[in-house]
Amino acid sequence: MLIIKDLTVSYGTAPVLHKINLEVPEGKIVTLLGANGAGKSTTLKTISGLLKPLSGQITFYNKRIDSLSPDQIVKLGVSHVPEGRQIFPGLTVEENLKMGAYVNYKPREVAKKIDMIYEVFPRLKERKKQLAGTMSGGEQQMLSIGRGLMSEPKLLMLDEPSLGLAPIIIEDIFKKIKEINELGTTILLIEQNANLAFAVSDYAYLLAVGKIVMEGETRVIRENKMLLAAYLGGSN
Amino acid sequence: MSLATLIQLIFQGLNMGLIYALAALGISLIWNASGLFNFSQGDLLTIGGYIMLTFFSFLSLPYPVAFLITIVIMGIAGYLLSKGYFYPMFQQNFNPQIILIGTVALSVFIRNSVLLTWGPNAKTYTNPFGSKPLALFGVNLMPHYFWNIVIVAVLVLALQMFLKGTVIGIAMRAVAQKPVAASLMGVKVGQMISLTFLLSTGLAAISGILIAPIIPLTPEMGGLLAIKAFAAALIGGLGSFGGALVGGIIIGIAEVFFATLVTSTYKDVFIFAVLIAFLMIRPGGIFRADISEKV
Ligand SMILES: Nc1ncnc2c1ncn2[C@@H]1O[C@H](COP(=O)(O)OP(=O)(O)O)[C@@H](O)[C@H]1O
Ligand SMILES: [Mg+2]
């Protein structure tokens, strides 16, 4: 469904991504692994239209999207849950969710979608009138994912959903990610923690200093312990 | 001082304060949305007054009609100002100080344009709410005191309802808090910022409309008004809705009391002193605008 071809992206003059190729098939969970600074977030920002590539192309359902604006890309069904959650701290949980449906806002449908999000994340329902900034990190991450689902995306892109969370909460969040995928949403997941990612994903890419250095089915990739350790550090 | 005088001064100060508060609210809205200041805010207020003068006094349109026309014209002007100047500069990450200096130039430009269009003499129009004080329990109160309270209350409520109760309003607040995340939601950040300028300029215009029957319009009056509006926003807490109101009222009342009890010659200097004293005691303003109550 999403195909990236020879994508080169730079901030200013120095390229951060060098001709990367990546594919996300419908229905799967694909992981993009890489150490800090490898260019993972840059990849997602380019897909969602926040950054414009220097060269290369991105197609979504056979349509070029690399020159579209973020709102057009959301409308096509790509949702980007950014690194560090980026919820709107001074809006209530409910208002945050409403913002997720901004591009196609129909009050009745939005109310229904919000109820669906509350089914996936019951915690959010308990806190619906609370200001999002006053919630715990884990709850904020749930909200950020919930907000990302409000546009009913075909492709959900998650940038390090485990960042800064306690292991028990991470486990919970990854369970939800699996659940969301099983309900039919394709997922492009970014992680630094390989073991977490391997537990849920079908296919993985390894990014190092702006280049894809390895890719393959998760069960194959995970066996290549030495290479993973070399690129991701000893903790994996 | 008799109780009657006291009440009279409070009303008089409250009336001026609410007018400053509207302009301060506009300043806070823009600050939240873009982190920018518009130094020409006071001059936009002046033009609002002059446009009202033209429609209400020269063309003799009914007050509400002239009022609405003026707000619409000024709102559009604010929108275009953002599209043409603020947002392009903001988007290209110009240093906020440079953007601010540009608005100083804009302020000079507006003053000279007003001078060319309407001339140097002070101008005013008849007070639509009547210029005969009402004697209530021995206190002489101008009818416009009450009308202005009603007008400002309605405006503030409407603005709150817009910001809290509509998707566009929520999106405007979202942009003020997390512009990048908002654009990931498909919100067009530039449009929201321009909309903020529209609101802000509309509010300034209403200040101008309400002030003209009280303080005659002159081409350069915007400078002092801007300072009072900025003082109100800073004292209340930059970016805070309630702060703009309270700050405006403090400035209005302080000014009236000082002018009456001490001397009216130095009332503007006194406002500076109040501002500086406030900033020394409480640099963040009364309501340090924590996110929860940002406009
Ligand atoms: N806004 C920016 N301006 C300049 N360089 C940036 C910017 N954002 C990221 N970079 C650089 O691009 C590289 C990749 O960053 P990023 O995509 O955030 O990595 P990752 O998400 O894999 O940790 C890093 O070297 C980083 O310093
Ligand atoms: Mg990153």
Image: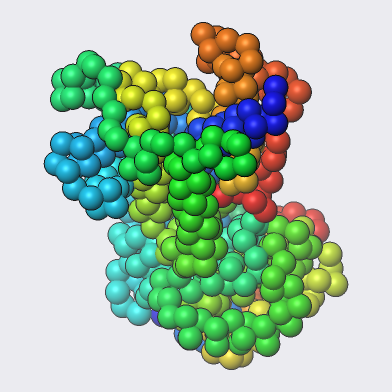
Q: Is B223 displayed left or right of A218 in the figure?
A: left
Question: What is the x, y in percent for residue A32?
Answer: 58, 66
Q: How many marks?
A: 0
Instruction: Name the residue: 23% across, 50% down.
Output: B62
Name the spot of residue B226 as percent of width and height, x first: 45, 26
Name the residue rendered at 51%, 25% in the picture: B228
**Is residue A28 visible to us here?**
no
Regarding ligand 2, which quadrant of the image does it lie in?
bottom right
Q: How is the image coloured?
A: rainbow
User: Is A80 situated left or right of B290 in this image?
Assistant: left
Image quarter where the N terminus of chain B lies is top right
Q: Nearest the camera: A221 or A190?
A: A190
Q: Is residue B36 left or right of residue A137?
A: left
Could you tell me residue B132's position as x and y percent? 41, 36
Q: Nearer the viewer, residue B135 or B289?
A: B135
Vertical position of residue B159 compared to residue A180: above or below: above
Residue B124: image quadrant is: top left
